[in-house]
Amino acid sequence: MRVLIDGACPYCRALGRTLKALDLGGTLQVVPLQEASGLDPKALLEELHVLEGDRTHRGYAALLALARRLPLLWPLYPFLLLLVPFGTGERLYRFLAKRRPRARASRGGDHP
């Protein structure tokens, strides 16, 4: 499983470090999205992408995929699922994603 993070975002880099620490099996690859190819660069900057085989999880779905994959996050998985109906989890994800430091610094540029 590959996790594409924004290498220019301090929150994203912290998330990458946290995920690596939670990955007891050492199966995650945390990669700066700036090194990714074959995916829409604008979409990569707007939301977290997790690549799992031939599947691409984006935004809140990426968080769900990580919670399913990392045993230390399994206790959170049922709670995260409760936020799926009516798009609650996705809206919360987008609210937080729009406020990350790089998004704030680039308004009018690469971010909404």
Image (cartoon, rainbow, N blue to C red):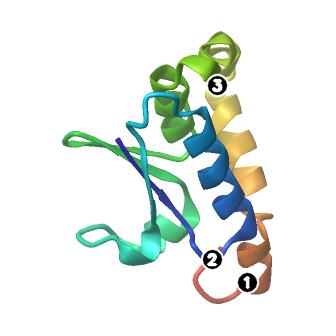
Quarter of the image for residue 33 reads bottom left
Q: Earlier in the sequence, mark 3 or mark 1?
A: 3
Task: Kindly identify the residue that appears in the image at 62 percent across and 22 percent down.
Answer: 73
Quick one: label 2 or label 3, which is nearer the N terminus?
Answer: 3
Compared with 103, 92 (above or below) is above
Q: Is residue 5 left or right of residue 27?
A: right
Q: The disc labelled 2 sits on which kind of residue?
A: His
The quadrant of the image that shows the N terminus is top left
From the image, tell me which residue sits under label 2: 111
Task: Identify residue for label 1.
Answer: 107
Q: Secondary structure at mark 1?
A: loop
Residue at image position (30%, 67%) is 39
* Label 1–label 2 contact, CB within 8 A: yes
Residue lying farthest to the left in this orientation? 54
**Residue at the spot 54% in from the left edge and 47% down from the top edge:** 59
Residue drawn 63% across the image and 89% down it: 109
Report the front residue among 2 and 87: 2
| Secondary structure state at the residue bearing disc 2 | loop
Label 3 Cα neighbours within 10 Å, binned few <14 / some 14-19 / many ≥20: few
Residue under pointer 3: 86
Tag 1: Cα neighbours inside 10 Å, few (<14), some, or many (≥20)? few
